[in-house]
């Protein structure tokens, strides 16, 4: 947890008619979908923004189409605003002052800490943008008397739309196996999308969360190699995990990049396989009752939606 500029410490009062309203940015995304389901189950009326046209429904969700930066005709005042998309874009929009709500819950990333000293300039830029976005959001919220909380997930999975574990699963099925260097033993804490939706809801009833940023890792810490092994074991075809000497893996990586199989997998990402990326969930557990599940994947978690 990170202490940030002071914000009002209050929980959102429920309306007497039970008709609380939420505005959700990124409602069609991998975290947004389970969050919508939880809001509807709790009796909320939801306005959700998406860049792509969405089918109306389920009852209680009103879809708005548009880009975060330019969307107009948003509800002028809601009980809660959720951001499930890029934090930097949301923070810029929120700082304009045309969004009003009693509370804000926004998703960032643990990359703000992991990538700040990366050997890759692009990754350092990601960390910088996240850091600046958090500061911008908290400054704007504090100035307007709005309680804001930032949640920083680790490796997200569960909706078949993540860029790490789902990508590994798809590659493994295509190639009938997946290769890792033998020293890919750095620790990881993969977190399920529904656990993130649950902790976002918990922020609404936790006055202490105002003005705070929380790490929200998964409920189990395991080695990178073991994490990948469980992904492969969950797939119907049971693709094989090949463990290669590190030098051989690096030698084979160059042609794999040229072939597009390892596109985007840079040297910094390779080095991180040996690093422990472990985050303390105790503050979120204490303040928000956060209790994420252990990593027990099944094939549906890595199946992209139709």
Image (cartoon, helix red, strand yellow):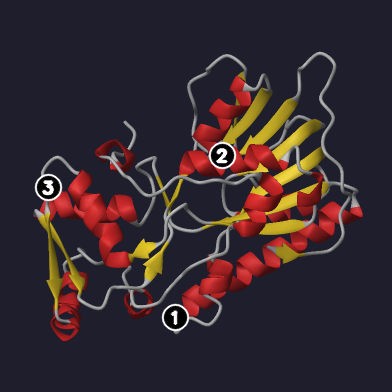
Q: Choose top left, top right, bottom left or bottom right for residue 140.
A: bottom right
Mark 2 nearby-residue class (10 Å; few <14, some 14–19, many ≥20):
many
Q: Which quarter of the image is occupied by the N terminus? A: bottom right
Q: Which residue is mark 3?
A: 238
- Answer whether residue 89 is visible to the viewer in this image: no
Q: Earlier along the polypeptide chain: callout 1 or callout 2?
A: 1
Q: Earlier along the polypeptide chain: callout 1 or callout 3?
A: 1
Q: As drawn, is 114 to the left or to the right of 20?
A: left
Q: Position of residue 275 (x, y in %)?
A: 40, 77
Is 229 drawn above or below residue 17 in the view shown? below
Is 253 drawn above or below residue 85 in the view shown? below
**Do the residues bearing badges 1 and 3 touch, measured as CB atoms within 8 Å?**
no
Circle 1 SS class:
loop
Circle 2 SS class:
helix
Q: Which residue is mark 1?
A: 120
Q: Nearer the viewer, residue 304 or 247?
A: 247
Q: Earlier along the polypeptide chain: callout 2 or callout 3?
A: 2
- Answer whether residue 229 is visible to the viewer in this image: yes
Q: Which residue is mark 2?
A: 197
Mark 3 nearby-residue class (10 Å; few <14, some 14–19, many ≥20):
some
Is 2 drawn above or below residue 51 in the view shown? below
Mark in the foreground, 1 or 2: 2
Q: As drawn, is 162 to the left or to the right of 5?
A: left
Name the residue located 68 percent from the left edge and 54 percent from the top edge: 150
Mark in the foreground, 1 or 3: 3
Q: As drawn, is 44 to the left or to the right of 35?
A: right
């Amino acid at each position: 947890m990170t202490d940030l500029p002071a914000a009002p410490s209050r929980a959102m009062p429920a309306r007497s008619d039970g008709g609380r309203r939420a505005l959700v940015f990124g409602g069609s995304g991998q975290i947004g979908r389970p969050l919508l389901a939880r809001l509807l189950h709790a009796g909320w009326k939801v306005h959700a923004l998406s860049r792509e046209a969405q089918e109306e429904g389920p009852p209680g969700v009103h879809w708005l189409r548009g880009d975060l930066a330019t969307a107009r005709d948003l509800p002028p005042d809601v009980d809660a605003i959720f951001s499930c998309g890029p934090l930097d874009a949301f923070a810029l929009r929120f700082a304009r002052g045309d969004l009003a709500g009693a509370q804000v819950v926004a998703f960032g990333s643990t990359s703000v800490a992991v990538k700040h000293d990366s050997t890759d300039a692009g990754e350092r830029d990601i960390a910088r943008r996240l850091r600046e976005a958090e500061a911008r959001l908290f400054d704007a919220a504090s100035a307007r008397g709005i309680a804001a909380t930032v949640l920083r997930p680790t490796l997200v999975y569960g909706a078949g739309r993540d860029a790490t574990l789902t990508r590994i699963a798809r590659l493994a099925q295509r190639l009938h196996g997946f290769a890792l260097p033998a020293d890919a033993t750095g620790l990881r804490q993969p977190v399920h999308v529904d656990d993130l939706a649950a902790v976002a809801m918990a922020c609404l009833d936790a006055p202490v969360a105002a003005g705070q940023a929380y790490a929200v890792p998964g409920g189990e810490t395991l080695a990178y190699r073991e994490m990948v092994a469980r992904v492969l074991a969950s797939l119907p075809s049971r693709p094989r995990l090949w463990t290669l000497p590190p030098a051989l893996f690096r030698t084979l990586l160059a042609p794999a990049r040229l072939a597009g199989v390892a596109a985007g997998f840079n040297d910094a990402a390779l080095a991180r396989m040996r690093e422990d990326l472990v985050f303390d969930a105790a503050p979120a557990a204490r303040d928000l009752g956060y209790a994420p599940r252990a990593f027990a994947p099944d094939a549906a978690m890595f199946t992209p939606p139709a």
